[in-house]
Amino acid sequence: MFLGGGAADPMNLGYSASLPSVAAERTPDYAVLFQREFPKVVRTVYLVVRDHGRAEELAQEAFVQLLMHWKKVSGYDRPEAWVRRVAIRLAMRSSTRERLRSVLERRAVVEPPPGEGVDLSEALGQLSAPQRAAIVLHYYEDRPVDEVADILVCSVNTVKSHLHRGRNKLRVLLGECEGDLDES
């Protein structure tokens, strides 16, 4: 289930046949982390990829990677940050691949006139994957710029650039005046 607490059983992600050597590493700590963080990771990934099913798949893949690296990652101060970083990177790759596929399928893209009938979700979908990820992490999840940089594995200045360009594009797409958006 998406966005609710009804996440799948953390020990049965549908990958059990390919993870037999990891079975011994399964711990209650992993299950607790999964139950607490899975819905949050799915929501964040959804805002990047804009597809509920794909968001769940990517979040599951990130948690499978976490399970495979649990011995090492469980010793980190914030293993949830590690899984979130993996999920965001998978989402950005997926989004980039989807965008390329879409461009190849449709050579001519007709965009709606700025500000006419475009909602925030549609406008976010028109940002590049790195801009969208930065905007979602910074504004939706209320994460500081340096933490966004850690998650996206880039410099603070790169995040600031993504945020600036993303805000400017959203401003145009949503028909906002320059003074209407708070840039803090």
Image: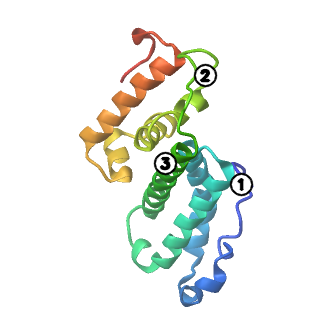
Mark 1 and mark 2 in contact (Cβ < 8 Å)? no
Q: Quadrant of residue 18?
A: bottom right
Mark 2 or mark 1, which is nearer to you? 2
Of mark 2 and mark 1, the one earlier in the sequence is 1
Report, in whole angstroms, how far the alpha carbon at label 2 lies from the one at label 3.
Answer: 22 Å
- Which residue carries the number 1 mark? 5
- Which residue carries the number 3 mark? 100
> Which is more toward the observer, 35 or 157?
157
Q: Amino acid at mark 1?
A: Gly
Mark 3 and mark 1 in contact (Cβ < 8 Å)? no
In what element is the residue under mark 1? loop
- Which residue carries the number 2 mark? 118
Q: Amino acid at mark 2?
A: Val
Mark 3 and mark 2 in contact (Cβ < 8 Å)? no
Report, in whole angstroms, how far the alpha carbon at label 1 lies from the one at label 3.
Answer: 33 Å
Of mark 2 and mark 3, the one earlier in the sequence is 3
